[in-house]
Structure formats: structure tokens, C-alpha cells
Image (spheres, rainbow, N blue to C red):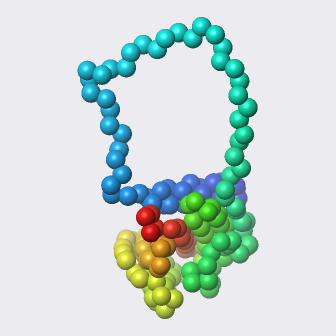
Amino acid sequence: MHRPWQRRAAAVLLASLLLGACQARDDDAGFVPPPPSEAPSEPEPITETPPLVPVEIPKPDMAFSGPSEPPSGLSDDVPLFPDATTIGSMTSPTRGTIVNLNSPEPADAIFAWYLDELAKRGWTLDKQSTTTFSHLVTATKDARRATILIKTGPAGTAILITVAQVSGG
């Protein structure tokens, strides 16, 4: 049996991966190793201990909300499925907003509702995909991208919404 903290940790991990994927850019250069002729040399041994410098640990820029709490940081033009229960949400000024919902309704009905509702609220539907157990829609509006993943599971239908600024936009 899953404990609430395990579900939240899994949701935050999945959401971080989705946001990272949403913010990736085609022109990002990967790691380029040095040519073999420029192999790193042996480091010089340390002869004295460097002084300790005080370090201020930054406070996290994320805010979390728990089950059944309204998601913070989500604008009114991002629809929440009416028959869904909020499992949790996370808001970060640098990464956007992530909302995790659950509904007893079938995934096909929720997907159709999101396609209709996003269009009504002025979002441009960019991508849609469907598999046996999941649906994905990506939409843009102004300088924001919303990604909605709808997945059939053993405890109903999971809905994961991410909204973030578009890179370079």
C-alpha cells in the first residue's frame, strides 16, 4: 500500500521530468569531451587546508499544496476537470506549476473535455497523442505551455497538468 508521501514524491519526480522535457531546447549543446590529445593531467597535491568559507543555503523556490487544497499559482484560464480531486500541487517561479488530480471518470471522456475546454479558453492545441492507457495534450497561450497527461490507473484516472513559460518566449 502506498503512503501519501510516496505518492507525492512520485508526483514531484514525474512533474520535474515533464517540466525538464518541456523546457528542453533543440539548440542545447550536449557535453563534448576533450580530444584525446588533451587528456587531463594529474592534479597537484594539496599541501595546506583551504580556509572554510561560510555558505548560505538558498531557500527552495517551490511551494507545495496538499490533498484537496486548491492548487496555488494556477491561472484561471487553465481548466481543472470538474469531477476531479486534487492530490497535490507544486508551484515554482522558475519551473512553473504542476497539479496532480484524480477522477473516477474514464480517460477518454476527460481527454475530450480538456480538448474542448482548452480551446474555449483561448489555448492553441499543439500536440495530441493517445495510447491504450494514456492521453497527452500540449497547448500554448501567450508565452505559456500547458501539458496535460491523462492516464488510466487502478485507482481511477490520474490527471497531471504542467504549466510553464515557453523557453525564449
Q: Residue at x 67, y 66 (%)?
A: 88
- Residue in the foreground of this view, choosing between 109 and 26: 26
Q: Residue at x 69, y 46 (%)?
A: 58
- Please determine whether, in this image, residue 66 is positioned above or below residue 34: below
Query: Where residue 143 sits in the image (x, y, percent)?
Result: 47, 74
- Please determine whether, in this image, residue 133 is positioned above or below residue 27: below
Q: How many dots with numbers?
A: 0
- Residue in the foreground of this view, choosing between 81 and 145: 145
Query: Where residue 63 sits in the image (x, y, percent)?
Result: 70, 61
Q: Quadrant of residue 56?
A: top right
Q: Quadrant of residue 66?
A: bottom right
Q: Quadrant of the C terminus?
A: bottom left
Q: Residue at x 52, y 67 (%)?
A: 164
Query: Where residue 119 sits in the image (x, y, percent)?
Result: 45, 88
Whether residue 119 sits left or right of residue 3 in the image: it is left
Q: Quadrant of the N terminus?
A: bottom right
Query: Where residue 30 sits in the image (x, y, percent)?
Result: 35, 44
Q: Residue at x 62, y 75 (%)?
A: 74
- Name, please, the residue furthest toward the bottom: 120
